[in-house]
Image (cartoon, rainbow, N blue to C red):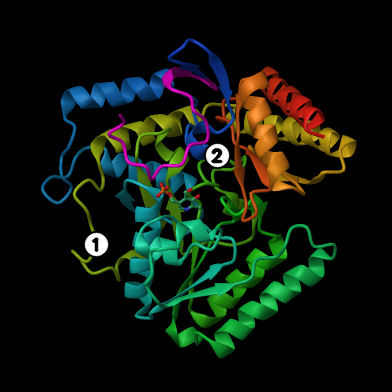
Amino acid sequence: MSHLSNVWFSVTPLQVASGHGCWVTTTDGEEYLDFAAGIAVNSTGHAHPQVAQAIADQAQRFIHAQVNVFKHDLLEPLAAKLAEITPAGIDTFFYANSGAEITEAAVKLAKQATKRPNIIVFQGSFHGRTHMAMAMTTSKTVYRAGHAPLPGGVYVSPFPDPLASDQEAAINHALKAFDRLLLAETAPSETAAVIMEPVQGEGGYIPAPRAFLEGVAARCREHGILFIADEVQSGFGRTGNWFAIEQYDVEPDIICMAKGIASGFPFAALGTSRAIDDRWPKGSHGGTYTGNVLGCAAALATIDVLTAPGFADNVNARGAQLRDGLSAIMASDAGVVDVRGLGLMNAIQFADPARVAAIQKHCLEDGRLILMNAGTYGTALRLMPPLVVTADEVDTAVGAIAAAVKATA
Ligand SMILES: Cc1ncc(COP(=O)(O)O)c(C=O)c1O
């Protein structure tokens, strides 16, 4: 009999014994190629020696130095590193342990800094599973159902459909709907912030079209609404830049980081400007484990690995290789409706969700390849390998997907 909660859903029935790079070994000795990477978390691969060593070394010194009681010697060095790699204007950091905690923190800061109550989110968004984050999440009802009442003050605006045949019309429609929201539902003077994933993650791995993201950001500037970039999934090198927002002409007021930041050690960071942070009343936010020293050590080691010469080039080259392979599969099968992505944040979308489930099963059982799906309709297969993935491993994954697509046609 299991003593574990029933609440976790399972992507595979596997019991992991160890991991190395892009590979995991199960307790029965089988090896699997991991293109889920802990849901886009294991940026440096499983058990990267530099990251493992940094955590082990730090654990010998001390494990927890509570941030209100002491300042430890990794807080400032990590903030200084983050200031170097985050977009211009971001120079002040708050730490937490998970993505949901950091999007919650971003909303709390935005409300305090603007003295306004409301938040705008986009259809298909995912910002986490705590109550406010759930209220801001619209990618699937399963995340929200049964939890009402959710916090109020959250307004939902459309996100352009990547499959719309007229992309310009889809973008204009979404921007017009945003304008209408400000006129009809939440006045700018009551709107603290917009929170947007530059590449929607759980919503289906959909890069925001440039004119849309930049159009929303321009409206935020005009009205004094803060622009929060939720880079929990798209950040930390996943898209071939440190952050996906760098691919747009926009400087966010607040940036949310988690997942890949510490290679799997639970850690998250919020970045903003000193001017905005100065409006966050002392003591109005915090948390027992915020600024955890093991997380800081893991994040510093992760940044070191990710800054190695040629690292981002590999992400971009492997991403292009993957999209080429997936595009060839698309050309051979009418059930594939889209291939898209940036860097190593890619999706292949099918018309039929049952087909996606069958392909995942085939890949796992025959290809020893671990994949996850995404999207409101479960029609996107997302490819999010560790960023250290090699050309051979990408070929192996594409081969397994091609075989599964053929077998399920
Ligand atoms: C964009 C985004 N924001 C927030 C979260 C929540 O992160 P966590 O699961 O660490 O709370 C996620 C998780 O998938 C995410 O993709």
Residue under numbered circle 1 = 285
Location of residue 333 with respect to 20 vertically, above or below: below
Answer few, some or many: residues within 10 Å of disc 2's Cα (few below 14, many 20 plus, some between 14 and 19): many
Depth check: 335 or 76 in front?
A: 335
Q: Nearer the viewer, residue 187 or 77?
A: 187
Principal SS element in the magenta part?
A: loop
Q: Position of residue 74 (x, y in %)?
A: 26, 37
Q: Position of residue 33 (x, y in %)?
A: 59, 22
Look at the image and give the residue range highlighted in magenta.
Answer: 1-23
Q: Is mark 1 within 8 Å of ligand 1?
A: no
Callout count: 2
Residue 263 in magenta stretch: no
Is 64 left, or right, of 135 in this rendering? left
Q: Amino acid at mark 1?
A: His
Return the residue nearer the eye: 227 or 87: 227
Q: Which mark is residue 237?
A: 2
Residue at 54% across, 61% down: 251
Spot the residue most to the bottom.
184
Mark positioned earlier in the residue sequence (2 or 1): 2
Q: Amino acid at mark 2?
A: Gly
Cα gap from disc 2 to disc 1, whole angstroms:
28 Å
Q: Nearer the viewer, residue 144 or 226?
A: 144
Q: Residue at x 40, y 41 (%)?
A: 81
In the figure, is residue 102 to the left or right of 176?
left
In percent of width and height, residue 336 lies at 80, 43
Q: Quadrant of the N terminus?
A: top left
Q: Is residue 172 above or below residue 200?
A: below
Tell me if I can see residue 273 in this picture.
Answer: no
SS for callout 1: loop
Give me the residue at 48% from left, 37% from top. Answer: 10
Provide residue 261's location: percent of width, then percent of height.
Answer: 43, 40
